[in-house]
Amino acid sequence: MIRKIVVYPDKRLKQRSCEVVEFDSTLHTLLDDMNETMTAKNGIGLAAIQVGVPLRALLINLPDEEGEQYPENLIEVINPVIVDRRGSTTYTEGCLSVPEYYDDVERSEWVKVEFQDRYGEKKSIETDGLLAIAFQHEMDHLDGHLFIEKLSFLKRKKFEKEWKKKLKEMREKKK
Ligand code: CO
């Protein structure tokens, strides 16, 4: 089932998500719904809070060079912790909760992440490139942070002004 995406400045996006303790059918349904929602919106990553569920769960599915997403490339990440990081890199990021806005963000180039899968099995991944960036972006959601918080003061100010205008236009379209 496709769920509704929580859009900025909804306050829920600022909350810290809770640790997953039950690896049960409710969690599995959530993960399946998140995948359906992410795929429908052409996203490469999605955190549970973005569908309004404050749990430390996220998905990543990076497309190949042709932009195609394959189900077998889906990574389900529960209770992740970055245990090591190196270097720095800049990438133009976007977010399904801040639709159609993209900007450059600096993050660690390489990360080692420990997490659990949907059955509670412990996993570990060492990665760089877009996957490392996606992990960091999605994990920020679990702590109530968005990539726009990393913008410079002036860029953020400009963004807020444009965003207000955009929300107003969206509301007027609905009337
Ligand atoms: Co995001």
Image: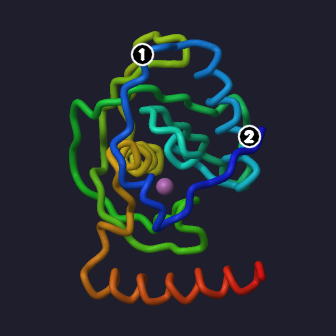
User: Residue at point 74% right, 40% down?
Assistant: 36
Residue 33 sits in quarter: top right
Question: Residue 105 sits in which quadrant?
Answer: bottom left
Asked whether mark 2 lies closer than 8 Å to ligand 1, one says no
**Lateral position of residue 82 relative to residue 49, left or right:** left
Which element carries disc 2, helix, strand or loop? helix
Question: What percent of the width, then of the height, locates residue 79?
Answer: 38, 26
Query: Relative to the observer, which residue lies in front, 155 or 63?
Result: 155
Q: Which structural element holds mark 1?
A: loop
Q: Is mark 1 within 8 Å of ligand 1?
A: no
- On the image, the x and y values in percent for residue 5 come to 62, 54
Q: Which label sits on residue 36?
A: 2
Task: Count the marks.
Answer: 2
Inter-mark Cα distance, 1 to 2: 23 Å
Q: Residues within 10 Å of mark 2 (few under 14, many from 20)?
A: some
Q: Quadrant of the N terminus?
A: top right
Identify residue type, mark 2: Glu
Neighbourhood count class around disc 1 (C-alpha, 10 Å): few under 14, some 14–19, many 20 upward: few
Q: Is residue 149 above or below residue 166?
A: above
Task: Specify whether 23 is left or right of 36.
Answer: left
Residue 88's spot in the image, x, y percent? 25, 56
Q: Which residue is mark 1?
A: 21
Amino acid type at circle 1 is: Val
> Which residue is at the front of the view, 139 or 68?
139
What's the residue at 71%, 86% (across, down)?
172
Seen in the picture, residue 72 relative to 46 is either above or below; the reply is above
